[in-house]
């Protein structure tokens, strides 16, 4: 089994492991989930993203993780931290958090639970000075969650990405510094 990185009341956040490409494709690669993040992926693209995450853990100690619901043992999403790697972004290299939850588990607080754990992990374990999160204006649920965690809109970091649908471009960003987070605790 892949390494467990974090645990919350209802979730296990673990690194990707053997067989997770198929799990990801089955549970997390639907048009509904992928609508605002570039669309449904081919298996080789999922495999490449998971390999990139595994490499990130080996190199820097962080990456994206599979979210496992403790009650059922099923994957309910993915979330984690990586470096901003979109070459069109004005802040490549900054620490970025992100998440995606499968639709039948929406509105149960899983995204918030995972994000809270990841923010704390980023600031306390990795000493990250600032986190950003990327989304689009049309993905209101995503940016509302960012605001819930005290993240502030950073229009200076917006950028156009022709790989996304017109409704999802420009890519917008929110940020939270370690100091802001500490002051809110």
Image (spheres, rainbow, N blue to C red):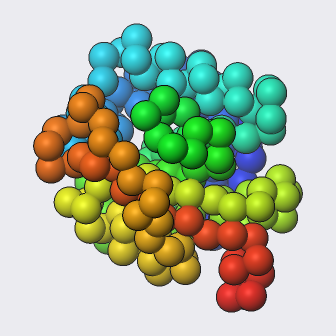
Residue at position x 73%, y 41% from top?
Answer: 62
Q: 88 and 144: which one is in front?
A: 88
Percent from the top left, x then y, of residue 36?
A: 26, 47
Q: 100 left or right of 183?
A: left
* Residue 161: image location, x then y, percent: 30, 36
User: How many numbered tags mark residues here?
Assistant: 0
Task: Using the rendered image of the protein, determine whether residue 48 is visible from the camera's viewpoint.
Answer: yes
Q: Residue at x 55, y 25 (%)?
A: 50
Q: Is residue 97 above or below residue 124?
A: above
Q: Tell me which residue sits at (28%, 49%) in the image.
A: 170
* Residue situated furthest bottom in the rendering: 184
Is 114 drawn above or below residue 126 in the view shown? below
Q: Quadrant of residue 137?
A: bottom left
Relative image position of residue 142 (x, y in whole percent): 36, 63
Who is closer to the viewer here, 37 or 93?
93
- The answer to whether residue 73 is above or below residue 133 is above
Q: Give the quadrant of the C terminus.
A: bottom right
- Can you tell which quarter of the image residue 45 is in? top left
Please identify the quadrant where the N terminus is shown: top right
Quadrant housing residue 124: bottom right
Residue 79 can be seen in this image: no
Left or right: 113, with 15 as reference point: left
Q: Nearer the viewer, residue 173 or 116?
A: 173
> Which residue is at 50% across, 74% downward?
152
Which residue lies most toward the left here? 166
Viewed as shown, does residue 114 lie left or right of 102? right
Side of 84 where 14 appears, left or right: right
The x and y percentages for residue 74 are 46, 45
């Amino acid at each position: 089994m892949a390494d467990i990185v974090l645990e919350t009341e209802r979730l296990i956040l673990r690194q990707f492991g053997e067989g997770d490409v198929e799990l990801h494709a089955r549970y997390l690669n639907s048009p509904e989930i992928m609508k605002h993040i570039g669309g449904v992926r081919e298996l080789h693209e999922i495999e490449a993203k998971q390999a990139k995450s595994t490499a990130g853990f080996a190199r820097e100690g962080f990456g994206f993780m599979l979210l496992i619901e403790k009650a059922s043992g099923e994957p309910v999403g993915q979330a984690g931290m990586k470096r901003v790697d979109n070459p069109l972004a004005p802040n490549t290299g900054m620490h970025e958090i992100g998440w995606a939850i499968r639709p039948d588990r929406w509105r149960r607080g899983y995204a918030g639970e995972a994000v809270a754990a990841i923010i704390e992990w980023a600031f306390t374990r990795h000493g990250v000075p600032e986190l950003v999160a990327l989304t689009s204006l049309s993905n209101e649920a995503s940016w509302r969650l960012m605001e819930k965690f005290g993240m502030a809109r950073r229009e200076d970091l917006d950028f156009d990405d022709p790989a996304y649908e017109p409704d999802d471009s420009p890519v917008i960003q929110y940020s939270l510094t370690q100091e802001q987070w500490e002051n809110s605790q």
